[in-house]
Amino acid sequence: MTIVAKFEIPYLRFLDAEGQITQSLPDFAQDPQNLIAFYRTMSLTRSFDTKAINLQRTGKLGTYPSSLGQEAISTAIGAAMQPNDIFCPAYREYAAQLQRGVTMAEILAYWGGDERGNNFAANREDLPIYVPLATQCLHAAGIASAFKLRNQSRVAVVVCGDGATSRGDFYEALNLAGVWQLPIVFLINNNQWAISVPRTAQTSAVTLAQKAIAGGITGEQVDGNDIIAIKHALDQAITKAREGSGPSLIEAVTYRLCDHTTADDAKRYCDQEMLKQAWQEEPIKRLRNYLNAIGYWDDEQEAKLQAECSQQIEQAVIEYMNLPPAALTDMFDYLYASLPAIYLEQRRELEAKK
Amino acid sequence: MTEITLVEAINQALTYEMQADQNVVLLGEDIGKNGGVFRSTVGLLEQFGPKRVLDTPLAESMIAGISVGMAMQGLKPVAEFQFMGFIYAGLEHIISHASRIRNRTRGRLTCPVVFRTPYGAGIHAPEHHSESTEALFAHIPGLRVVIPSSPAKAYGLLLAAIRDPDPVVFLEPTRIYRMVKQAVPNNGLALPLDKCFKLREGDDITLVTWGSMVYETLQAAAQLAEQNVQAEIIDVATIKPLDIQTIIESVEKTGRCVIIHEAARTCGVGAEIAAQLAEQCLLCLMAPIKRVTGYDTIVPYAKMEKHYLPTAEKIIQAVQEILAYEG
């Protein structure tokens, strides 16, 4: 027998669950100020999630999916991308969106049931939140194709969950990215759950990263609770894509510490022991432990940060709550560039409704 | 001037618009070197190069999906699906994204894409190659669905579809790809979308149709004329949004209407036209509206397809029944 091809999936981690360094740090992580900036973004995101859930529970927001436990992933994305790259999110990447200029009020408007939440004021080209799973992978591939056709030095970064990797669109996007050598980075937020279906029931593949291999592209796994590892892997993949050296897939292994959405109750299917164990691994605590250990963070700074986060979020909530209602006729006015005459009567009927 | 077929008119329109607009790119299976399975893109790879004529891997959801992504970046992709029976894998992108990206981002992102596909029966093709499911798309808000019925219409409507800032599903009747020839000046003039075309004037009855059925309808009208029945023929052309006003004006004049399409009858576009006529001009009708359509069956394989498709005889029979109607 002859072996015609052989593959390996590397695993990357710098910071373990206790916040101990496991290998020498990449350059960016040797500057504690960078790590502090990550820490602040992750903390802000967690507070925002908590507030959003409260708003939902008190009837001020619709169904909301939290990113609890997965903050390192989207914080790393936001930090690794250039402003003129394009981010193609799923729906748990608030930290990345916030860093890219999407406002909390916009995110709340979206989950509050207002399309205007997708009309980002400061970020006109990123995709909005995507609900149909894995479809964004193909849109990102199309965007990356446009970059390539125009010889632009830009990169598309797309996120999907572990469940989405079972969908055809995910494979089709990987395959195309490989064969066309597109400037794109795929990042899987493997939070172990697709609503109630565990990662092990999703595929018998040992890793999700290895799905890249069939598409002829690089796949690697990183500790999704270690922001240094995710950021480092992203830096390399984004640079590679920008240089025209092709796409990459990164599987970030983390854990969904929250329900799927506010409409879900994970206690119905999630082993509570497992959840307890997962809390030991979560990303914010380990970075705080590390920053504490090297003398760059203390309780006083923590209290100040929490107060700042609360204030910023309260401000956003006020903005969200004060958003004047949209015109009912908006449902017609953005349907086509100009509304075909045949729909004018329906529009008038709606307009008459006061 | 040389006369060209419908498929050559498609090629002529694509060539014209690719020269006029650098943002127009073509993508699909076998469209490059092979020039498309129906040869509608012949010569374009040679003329415009591999950056604008993209042979894709074989995955229709991917073709639809990357078209949406490209369009959101300001390109104007014209995506070819080899047969309508294979476009279904791309429906999620057409229905859940292309049709609504403008709406869901309140105009921030748009999707100027054309999804082209040959459609319809009558070419003795294998199964899944004879679909006529235009009503699926006509039901979707935010889309346009356009069906040319001649080389000149194909040229003018395809130019309009590519220039339109919103997604257009462009269905090319396979049976008439090479059936008729016309002189089509390559002048870059688009025909209006959202407009029906009157192909024949008449006072006795209105025949509403589109796509390849236009020819059975023209044939029927010619034979009816010999019996002193003057039929008015309306080629709907854009079935979404539907220019019902043109149809109403004709039916108000004739008082009678037959709708002809090859798609299955139930929930076909004919049902929508009949409903709107009933809502808006019932009292001008001197007889019930009739539909001459494909049966509510799966399109049969080649051996039986001619028994499925409406014929001029069936149209004439429907017209005569309506004319004989006495309330």
Image (cartoon, rainbow, N blue to C red):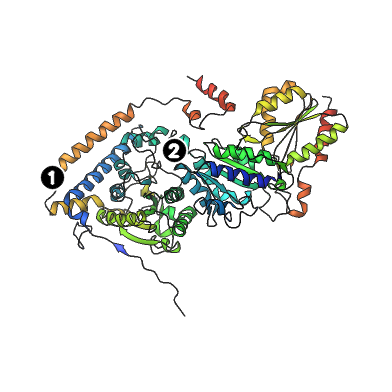
The numbered mark 1 sits on a residue in which chain? A
Q: What residue type is labelled 1?
A: Asp
Q: Indicate which disc residue B109 carries.
A: 2
Observer-nearest residue: A134 or A142? A142
The numbered mark 2 sits on a residue in which chain? B
Observer-nearest residue: A9 or B235? B235
Residue B212 pos. (x, y %) = 72, 42
Residue A343 pos. (x, y %) = 57, 27
The answer to whether A177 is drawn above or below residue A49 in the figure is below
Q: Indicate which disc residue B26 carries.
A: none
The answer to whether B252 is drawn above or below residue B53 in the figure is above
Observer-nearest residue: A24 or A274? A24
Query: In 3D space, how far apart are the residues under numbered discs 2 and 1 (Cα atoms)?
Result: 44 Å
Asked whether the viewer can see residue A71, the reply is yes
Quadrant housing residue A280: bottom left
Q: Is mark 2 on a helix, strand or loop?
A: loop
| Crowd rating for badge 1 (residues with CA inside 10 Å; few <14, some 14–19, many 20+) | few
Q: Residue at x 76, y 40 (%)?
A: B215
Are discs 2 and 1 less than 8 Å apart at CB?
Answer: no
Residue B126 pos. (x, y %) = 69, 56
